[in-house]
Amino acid sequence: MSPVVTRRPVPYPALGGCFEQDDIDAASAVLNEAAGPNPNFLAVSYEAEFQAAFARHEGAAHCEAVNSCGTALDLCMMVLKIGPGDEVITTPLTFICTASTAAARGARVVFADIDPRTLCLNPEAVEGKITSRTKAIIPVHFGGLAADIESFDRISAATGIPIIYDSAHAVGARSRGRPLGGCGQASCYSFQSNKNMTTLGEGGAVTTNDPEFTEQVRLRKTFGYVYGPQLRVTTIGFNYRLTKPQLAVGRTQLAKVDRINTQKRAAMRRLTELLADVEEIIRPPDFPDDHAAHLYTVRIDSRRVNISRSELLEYLKREYEIGTAIHYPAVWSWEVLQQLDHDRRDCPVAENVCGEILSLPVTAQSTEEDLEYIAWGLKQTLAALRRAV
Ligand SMILES: Cc1ncc(COP(=O)(O)O)c(C=O)c1O
């Protein structure tokens, strides 16, 4: 890149995929219908069609669309009857709700360490944390890279403990070519705005191969309704459903998510090339075709360089208008979880990694110039801060 570089703001994207004319048309069709002579926002057929398409896409037998990944996880905790006295093992490197949905049901969250290369939950560390009280294990497919499914399958088969995958980052991801929606007991997806597909800003799904599990999820997301000649309510349930415009847009977003993933993977591979000579950072693992390419997360290599992450983020923003995000602070550091009796021992990798990571702004629309600018800005920043130390 030439030494004279034009400043080009690259904010951290609020929209992870893209929103196009077909999405606008799909939402408009629902709104136009509602403004016509037979207004109707009931979503039954749209829901069935979206759920079938999403299940197919993720290689699962069943899907229940819900209004977020948080509610998807919450429903799974309810169906598994997680409660006081139970333990749920998960990763410290995740969004708050992977842990807080178990805590909300009164369970003790037990943190196991992560693999330093993939940043996903380490199955061996999980095995060391299993007790007779362990009622579920929740791995996260971090950034869109599948967790170690085969090892978790083995652990579940040996212990009978159900695996609930937090697949918030992983629509379209695969593990050695195997789709993720039917893995474990269930898989929980997010269609929130910054994911690679979105149902108008919020949304989610639970997929599973287990017909009884999906029925239990369906009951709880729909007031506990049992339909029949007479409507019955046999289970406490809520309303966690998606709206008709969201489901309509879900279909158009789903139709393009593989393209978005492919474009993001290409951009991420290119950024990895551009950062090849940067010694101070640890780049993410490769982006093979199985990767859903949600996050591009690097680590400041604290063994090689003593640079404060917050200074680096501020410098990138102030000097180069390059936006970043932290995915994530260690989940145990949130106040609400600190007040509870959660087990955070023996996670040295996560302790380090959570203080070193930052995500760079890569989108499906990133141009070669954007990527070169991000790489250049990061190199300049590292050089400046290194000199200042
Ligand atoms: C790993 C992970 N799990 C769960 C969630 C929650 O998703 P939602 O906002 O759809 O509830 C997120 C959201 O970013 C996430 O990153």
Image (tube, rainbow, N blue to C red):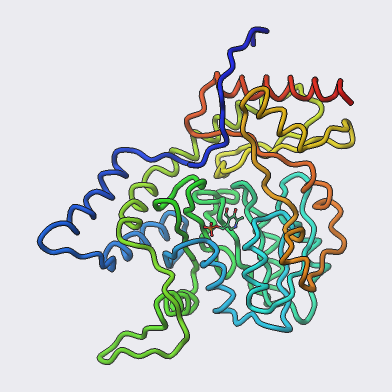
Q: Nearer the viewer, residue 58 or 6?
A: 6
Q: Is residue 230 left or right of residue 285?
A: left
In the rendered view, would you say 282 is above or below 124?
Answer: above
Tell me the quadrant of the picture where the C terminus can be found.
top right
Determine the image quadrant of residue 183: bottom right
Q: Nearer the viewer, residue 235 or 170?
A: 235
In the displayed structure image, the side of residue 255 where residue 125 appears, left or right = right
Q: How far from the left and from the top, in percent, is residue 100?
A: 65, 67
* Residue at (64% x, 11% y) in the render: 1
**Residue at far front of view:** 318
Residue at x-position 34% and y-position 52%: 251
Residue 273 picture quarter: top right
- The number of numbered badges drawn on the structure is 0
The spot of residue 132 in percent (x, y) is 78, 81
Q: Where is residue 31 shown, x and y percent of the image? A: 23, 54
Q: Which residue does the image show at 78% across and 41% down from the upper left?
A: 356
Q: Residue at x 28, y 65 (%)?
A: 43
Of all residues, the one furthest to the left in this rendering is 37
Image coordinates of residue 20 in percent, x first then y, are 34, 38
Left/right of residue 353 with respect to residue 173 in the rendered view: right
State which image quarter holds ligand 1. Answer: bottom right
Residue 54 to residue 324: above or below: below
Nearest the viewer among 231 and 103 is: 103
Residue 67 in the image: above or below residue 75: above
